[in-house]
Amino acid sequence: MNSSIIIADDHPLVLKGLKDFLLEKKYNVIDSAVDGKEAYNLIIKHKPDIAILDIKMPFKTGIEIAEECNVKNVKTKIVLITFEKDINLYKKAKELNVFGYVLKEFALTEIENCISSVQNNTPYFSPELIDYLAPNKPPESINDLTNAEKRVLSFIAQNKTAKEIGDILSISSRTVEKHKSHIIRKLNLEPKHSSLSLFAKEYEIYLI
């Protein structure tokens, strides 16, 4: 799948390095930008499949671009690249349904995995970031959850109702409740919402 990609970074060497790398790997990089305003305008103009954005840029940050794309229902999948290992930025990115969060020091080794994951409609967050931010390791049983179940659980961590989750994922409330039942069984939790909510909040960072 040769997804259309734009990239943006206000550091010329970083931008050139990433662009040259992606082009060498035969990715379809259709444009690039040196600040947030230009990046946002390119997204609106080209409607690329993926936008790889530096978080901290002049005029608009990567987070602000993601917010505006959400408001305007732009379907471009946002990937953020940054040196920031910040729990609040991470949570904000998750709230905005950003599809990727890659640490710059690992960008060239991780970006292909990230793009592949995003193309398969699965969010990608740098493993090093998760390890750095995570206070506790989750139980092994979390690996038994499907991607859909993890997404439901991540929205539960954000205090969203079954109807709100259903609307976001374009499924019925009944299907959400079925997911919840399966999650409770797989994680061997007490069969009540509070136990599900507590688990979701404690291990939210792993629910990517």
Image: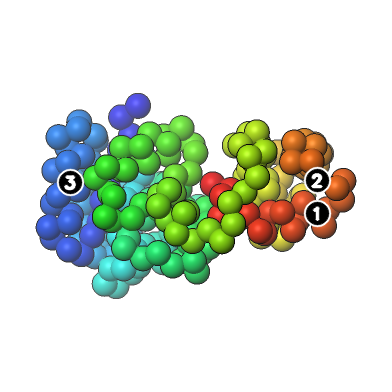
Query: Can residue 57 be seen in this snapshot?
Result: yes
Q: Nearer the viewer, mark 3 or mark 2?
A: 2
Q: Amino acid at mark 2?
A: Leu
Q: In this rendering, would 81 be left or right of 151?
A: left
Q: Which mark is residue 31?
A: none
Give yes or no for contact between labels 2 and 1 (Cβ–Cβ under 8 Å): yes
- For the residue pair 147 and 79, the one nearer the viewer reads as 147
Query: Can residue 168 be seen in this snapshot?
Result: no
Task: Give the x, y percent position of residue 104.
Answer: 28, 56
Pointer 3: what residue? 19
Q: In this rendering, would 122 be left or right of 146?
A: left
Pointer 1: what residue? 195
Q: Residues within 10 Å of mark 2 (few under 14, many from 20)?
A: some
Q: Residues within 10 Å of mark 1 (few under 14, many from 20)?
A: few
Q: CA distance from mark 3 to mark 2?
A: 46 Å
Q: Amino acid at mark 3?
A: Lys
Residue 91's place in the image compared with 180, above or below, is: below
Pointer 2: what residue? 189
Q: Residue 82's quadrant in the figure?
A: bottom left
Q: Earlier in the sequence, mark 2 or mark 1?
A: 2
Task: Give the x, y percent position of residue 43.
Answer: 33, 52
Q: CA distance from mark 3 to mark 1?
A: 46 Å
Residue 119's place in the image compared with 196, above or below, is: above
Does dot 2 land on a helix, a strand or a loop? loop
Residue at the (37%, 41%) spot, across then down: 114
Q: CA distance from mark 2 to mark 1?
A: 6 Å
Does dot 3 land on a helix, a strand or a loop? helix
